Image (spheres, rainbow, N blue to C red):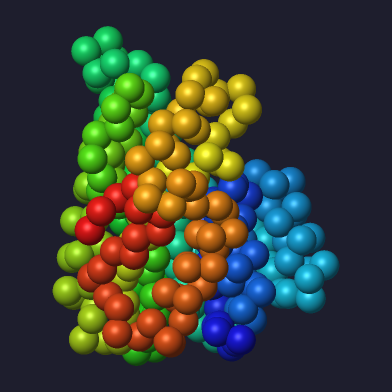
Amino acid sequence: MLLEGKNAVVYGAGGGIGGAFARAFAEEGARVFLAGRTREKLDLVADDIRAASGTADVAVVDALDEKSVDAHADAVVEAAGSLDISVNVISHGDVQGTPMVEMSLADYEQPVVNGVRTTFLTMRAAGRHMKRQGSGVVLLFGGGGDPVRNHAVGGLQIGFAALEAMRRQLAAELGRHGVRTVTLRTGGVPETIPADFPGAEELTAVLAEPTMLGRTATLADVGAVAAFVASDRARTMTAATVNVSCGALVD
């Protein structure tokens, strides 16, 4: 197994992307610590992992709260001995579907402020432990991309751009201590679009149309790549992005 003996923290593990990360990590042998604000959603993912003979721990954590994040990271290390993988995919509260010129400042800046805050807190919490142990992987999800045509995404991509700058900086500061940072870019995963999301069907078509493979990435695709990148087989990869967009994003 790729991640046997590793301990992984997934913030936002009750969501579609977070659940995909958590299930894939557990399938590859990691002990997975599921963190989020809604216990019921976390328990559903944990039940899936345990049913497949994996190991999962659940904790209610507000990833926008400094004390909550630090206390949970410390508890993980105390319980498991190390914190080897950290990924934060909580919702940043982006408001989509409203043109920029019609948006309020609060709606536009919300994903930027929330994204930077939560990513800093979880990067810092994991990074402190990883630096001390001399190893670790911090994964991000999103990355930069071309503007989405025919759909307004508000401050979403501005927030992603800020996180990429943070990821590069962390790679430069902690690389000498054996800590890697990598972003997964997808170009969109239609399975994560809520059924009641305005224009969901149209957005799904927009995401699929530019791909070179004629399809978009699935949650299972994202999880499988994340598990590989988090493993020692990808030990040369840091300060990098991994493209799992089916050719929608061209490097």
Left or right relative to 57: residue 3: left
Asked if residue 16 can be seen in this view, the reply is yes
Q: Nearer the viewer, residue 171 or 245?
A: 245
Could you say which quadrant of the image residue 128 lies in?
bottom left
- Which quadrant of the view contains residue 159? top left
The image shows residue 12 at horizontal and vertical percentages of: 54, 51
Tell me: 245 left or right of 1: left
| Picture layout, residue 131 above or below residue 186 | below
Answer yes or no: is residue 118 visible: no
| View extreme (top): residue | 102
Q: Which residue is at 30% across, 32% downward?
A: 148
State the quadrant of the N terminus: bottom right
Total number of numbered discs in the rendering = 0
Q: Residue at x 18, y 65 (%)?
A: 169
Tell me where residue 78 appears, x and y as whole percent: 56, 80
The image shows residue 200 at horizontal and vertical percentages of 53, 25
On screen, residue 72 versus residue 38, left or right, reads: left
In the rendered view of the protein, which quadrant contains the C terminus?
bottom left
Q: Residue at x 65, y 44 (%)?
A: 38
- Front residue (pair 39, 201): 201
Residue shown at 37%/50% (left/top)?
A: 212
Say if 181 sits above or below 244 in the image.
below
**Residue toward you, 168 or 39:** 168
Tell me if 173 is positioned left or right of 112 in this view. left
Name of the residue lying farthest toward the right: 51
- Where 172 sits versus 141, above or below? below
Vertical arrangement, residue 109 with respect to residue 161, above or below? above
Task: Residue 163 in the image: state x and y as whole percent.
Answer: 27, 52
